[in-house]
Image: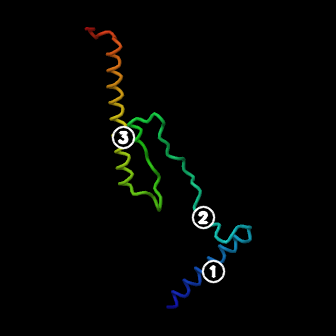
Amino acid sequence: MSFFLVFLAIVLIGAVLYLGAGIVRGRSIGAGLDDPVANLPPVVLSSKAKPSDVDSLRFALGLRGYRMDQVDQVLDDLRDQLQAKDREIERLNALARLEDGEPGRIKP
């Protein structure tokens, strides 16, 4: 029981000193308890992202971060959508080249 009281006294003294130091410096009482300022660069996906760009994305870990399995699933879906879009664009470009009568096509 006495160990608990000593521990409680130390915690209370530390809290008073912490809050008192903030007040002396002119800050509000809970100013040191705000969310920390992000010091990591943002994760940026380029405007012309390729499926390999999605594979190379990495997010910082945080105490209250996102569930990694959910982020991975969304990134996998995004990569698959980008691949499908790229294939469709290539197919339409090839079709347009054939319709324009590029060399190699026999006109009827």
**For mark 1, what is the residue?**
13
The first of marks 1 and 3 along the sequence is 1
Image disc number at residue 85: none
Q: Nearer the viewer, residue 100 or 79?
A: 100
Amino acid type of the residue that numbered disc 2 sits on in the rendered structure: Asp
**CB under 8 Å between discs 1 and 3:** no
Asked if residue 52 is positioned above or below residue 98 in the image, the reply reads below
Instruction: Please tell me whether mark 3 sits on a helix, a strand or a loop.
Output: helix
Instruction: Please tell me whether mark 1 sits on a helix, a strand or a loop.
Output: helix
Name the front one of labels 3 and 2: 3
Instruction: Please tell me whether mark 2 sits on a helix, a strand or a loop.
Output: loop
Going 48% across and 36% down the picture, which residue do you hit?
A: 47
Going 27% across and 8% down the picture, which residue do you hit?
A: 107
Indicate the quadrant where residue 51 lies: top left
**For mark 3, what is the residue?**
79
Going 45% across and 33% down the picture, which residue do you hit?
A: 48
The first of marks 3 and 2 along the sequence is 2
Asked if residue 34 is positioned above or below residue 2 in the image, the reply reads above
Q: Which of 58 and 102 is in front in this view?
A: 102
**CB under 8 Å between discs 3 and 2:** no
* Label 2 CA crowd tier, 10 Å (few <14, some 14–19, many 20+): few
